Image (cartoon, rainbow, N blue to C red):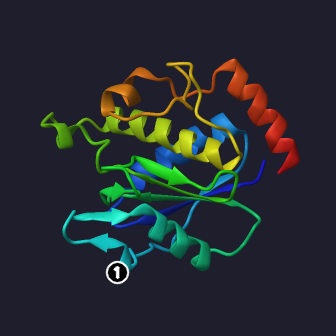
């Protein structure tokens, strides 16, 4: 599998990225690194009326910034993201492709009026990062409620699923990773 590069956008704790790096290395069995370059959000991605950032514009900007095809790029941000026809997204990815984004904004317990819990935040971030990276390989959403590839429309659905692929998605990932 291609190496994965984590690229911070905005205020992302390096400890959180370091923990994510270790977990992704174990799950995907590939090299994972953290970019020292911190990206800035493209101004045209911000929607002042919604007070959110359009994830598709950020992904387009990411594609033009990181043109190398020797690794998958996962942008990790604290920005509140949305996509066309959706109120918000936890993340988005090319499917298949090399570029994905995941936001911790709505993964933080504090967003829901709960106390700060870094362990819970990392669990949620890991699930969404694995999910979006799964899309970069060409995996689709899964109907298994425990599979990491299950679509999550709420934080409750994120919390219900596992950070691992079900056996069907794991087999498909292995097949697709040989092709890419």
On screen, residue 3 above or below 59? above
Report the residue at 52% width, 75% height from top.
Answer: 61
How many C-alpha atoms fall within 10 Å of the one at disc 1: few (<14), some, or many (≥20)? few
**Horizontal and vertical percent for residue 43?**
34, 80
**Horizontal and vertical percent for residue 172?**
77, 31
Tell whether 73 sits left or right of 13.
right
Report the residue at 64% width, 36% height from top.
Answer: 26
Asked which secondary structure carries label 1, the reply is helix
| Rendered image quadrant of residue 55 | bottom left
**Horizontal and vertical percent for residue 59?**
52, 66
| Rendered image quadrant of residue 24 | top right
| Rendered image quadrant of residue 80 | bottom left
Tell whether 161 sits left or right of 100.
left
Query: Which residue position holds label 1?
Result: 43
Tell whether 36 sits left or right of 171.
left
On screen, residue 34 above or below 21? below
Report the residue at 46% width, 70% height from top.
Answer: 57
**Horizontal and vertical percent for residue 20?**
50, 45
Q: Which residue lies furthest to the right in this view?
A: 179
């Amino acid at each position: 599998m291609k190496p994965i590069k984590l690229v911070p956008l905005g205020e992302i704790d390096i400890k959180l990225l370091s923990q994510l790096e270790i977990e992704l290395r174990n799950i995907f069995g590939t090299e994972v690194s953290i970019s020292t370059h911190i990206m800035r959000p493209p101004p045209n991605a911000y929607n002042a009326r919604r007070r959110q950032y359009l994830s598709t514009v950020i992904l387009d900007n990411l594609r033009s910034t990181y043109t190398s095809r020797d690794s998958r790029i996962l942008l990790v941000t604290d920005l509140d993201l949305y996509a066309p026809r959706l109120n918000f997204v936890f993340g988005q990815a090319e499917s298949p492709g090399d570029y994905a984004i995941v936001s911790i904004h709505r993964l933080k317990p504090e967003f829901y009026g709960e106390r700060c819990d870094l362990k819970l935040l990392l669990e949620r971030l890991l699930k969404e990062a694995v999910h979006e990276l799964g899309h970069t390989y060409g995996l689709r959403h899964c109907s298994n409620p425990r599979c990491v590839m299950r679509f999550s429309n709420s934080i409750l659905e994120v919390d219900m699923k596992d950070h691992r692929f079900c056996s069907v998605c794991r087999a498909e990932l292995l097949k697709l990773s040989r092709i890419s």
